[in-house]
């Protein structure tokens, strides 16, 4: 008679929590201003996410996009399969990120902001104890009435993701926020 209760306990007490934990990604927020590189086997990865929404017949897009919160980038360590969600440091169309990641080869998986998502394709490498700049991920919205109508039909923003080199500006912002981290910032740009 007690076998039903033990199965329920096993199922709800062990199996269900394991299912939830197995698919979870670690969320990485901006490192604290007193972060010390070298305390763990990790590196600081810096970059930027930018949106160029353009105009339609001279009109800028409505401001809802600015209020969707911070951008999230999901990256996957190719050796371990561990997923990490990088949270940009501020809301808006242009934001840096400064996060700590273990060394390894990483694959970009997706971008999210509010209820918007996009698959991403790209890879980058992280060495041990380094500060790594991976580039600027820039979304450029398609222009013109045709792209506007396509966006209405597919309920999205037609456009493309690009990786651009904005090393100087991103490193300058990093140095202003973290003057005590003196390591040279190495480039490891996102590759397709």
Image (cartoon, rainbow, N blue to C red):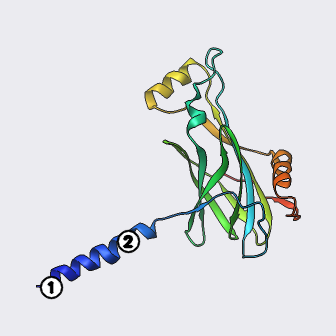
Q: Position of residue 75 (x, y in %)?
A: 60, 59
Q: Residue at x 82, y 58 (%)?
A: 178
Q: Residue at x 68, y 70 (%)?
A: 102
Residues at marks 1 and 2, CA–CA distance in whole angstroms: 22 Å
Instruction: Decide which of 122, 176 is in the foreground and name it.
Output: 176
Dividing the picture into quarters, in which one does residue 145 lie?
Answer: top right
Q: Position of residue 14 (x, y in %)?
A: 34, 77
Dividing the picture into quarters, in which one does residue 50 lie?
Answer: top right
Residue 44: image tag: none
Instruction: Decide which of 83, 66 is in the foreground and name it.
Output: 66
Q: Which element type, helix, strand or loop, lies under badge 2? A: helix
Q: Which residue is mark 1?
A: 2
Instruction: Decide which of 153, 17 is in the foreground and name it.
Output: 17
Q: Residue at x 82, y 49 (%)?
A: 173
Q: Which residue is mark 2?
A: 17
Q: Is residue 36 left or right of residue 153?
A: right
């Amino acid at each position: 008679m007690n076998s039903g209760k033990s199965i329920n306990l096993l199922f709800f007490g062990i199996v269900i929590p394991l299912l939830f934990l197995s698919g979870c990604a670690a969320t990485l927020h901006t490192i604290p201003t007193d972060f010390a590189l070298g305390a763990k086997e990790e590196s600081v990865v810096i970059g930027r996410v930018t949106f160029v929404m353009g105009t339609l017949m001279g009109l800028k897009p409505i401001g809802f996009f600015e209020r969707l919160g911070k951008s999230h980038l999901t990256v996957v360590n190719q050796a371990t399969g561990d997923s990490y969600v990088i949270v940009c440091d501020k809301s808006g169309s242009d934001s840096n990120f400064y996060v700590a990641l273990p060394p390894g080869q990483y694959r970009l998986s997706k971008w999210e902001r509010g209820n918007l998502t996009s698959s991403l394709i790209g890879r980058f490498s992280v060495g041990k104890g380094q500060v790594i700049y991976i580039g600027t991920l820039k979304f450029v919205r398609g222009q013109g009435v045709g792209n506007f109508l396509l966006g209405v039909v597919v309920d999205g923003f037609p456009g493309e993701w690009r990786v651009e080199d904005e090393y100087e500006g991103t490193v300058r912002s990093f140095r202003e926020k973290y003057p005590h981290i003196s390591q040279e910032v190495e480039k490891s740009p996102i590759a397709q």
